[in-house]
Amino acid sequence: MEPIIIDVREQDEFAAEHIPGSIWVPLSQFGRSAPGVLQSLAGRRITLMCRSGNRAKLAMEQIEQLGFGGQLSAEVYPGGILEWARQGKTVETRKSAPLPIMRQVQLAAGLVVLVSVMLSLYVDSRIVWVAAFVGAGLSFAGLTGFCGLARLLAVMPWNKSDSGVCHGTDDKGCC
């Protein structure tokens, strides 16, 4: 019996590229979403997948913490989806996928800082406070794990996924 693949990457990553038939349970919601999925997969072989293997290892730790360690056979796919694709295995890719949210945050914050600094040099020196505000926001995000800009960008129309991505499978492996 083939293992069930649980992909723990975030929505934008999964929508852009995933293994057909895999179940999407993002690491950021794993503690809340995984128990129901894991309960339905008791006794099955599970392979945890992420981009390179690091987040899948964290998901494996959470499986143990949630008390499912003895109920199912779970393993981390070494090298993640990068290695999977490198080996020529099937990966479903969405060509029109937007940049990952964190790259959008970096791009937006960098542009705002660059433009505000340039405007403060040539138009009005008080505009530099915009750059300071963005820097404070990024520092706050780093300290707390909450990024308001990422949340804002996530609800933008270009980040809405209507690709028909499968978020789970039935007993036959079908969506």
Image: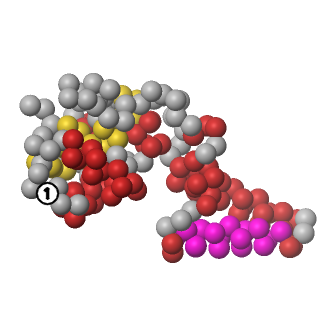
The image quadrant of residue 132 is bottom right
Examine the residues drawn in magenta and state their main secondary structure. helix
Quarter occupied by residue 5: top left
Q: Residue furthest right?
A: 123
- The residue at the point 53 percent across, 43 percent down is 99
Left or right of 77, for residue 123 = right
Q: Can residue 157 be spotted in the picture?
A: yes
Name the residue: 59% across, 68% down.
138
Seen in the picture, residue 118 relative to 1 is either above or below; the reply is below
Asked if residue 109 is positioned above or below residue 154 in the image, the reply reads: below
At label 1, which amino acid type do we have? Gly
In depth, the one of 58 and 87 nearer the eye is 58
Q: Give the image location of residue 101, x and y in percent.
A: 53, 49
Q: Is residue 71 above or below residue 114?
A: above
Q: Position of residue 76 (x, y in %)?
A: 19, 50
Element carrying mark 1? loop
In the rendered image, is residue 61 in sight? no
Which quadrant of the view contains residue 84? top left
The tally of labels here is 1
Q: Which residues are magenta?
A: 127-142
* Image quarter hosting the C terminus: top left
- Judge the density around disc 1: few (<14), some (14-19), many (≥20) Cα neighbours within 10 Å: some
Image spot of residue 71 (x, y percent): 11, 51
Q: Residue 112 in the image: x percent, y percent? A: 72, 59
Membership of 115 in magenta stretch = no
> Which residue is labeled 1 in the image?
69
Compare residues 71 and 18 and report the one nearer the observer: 71
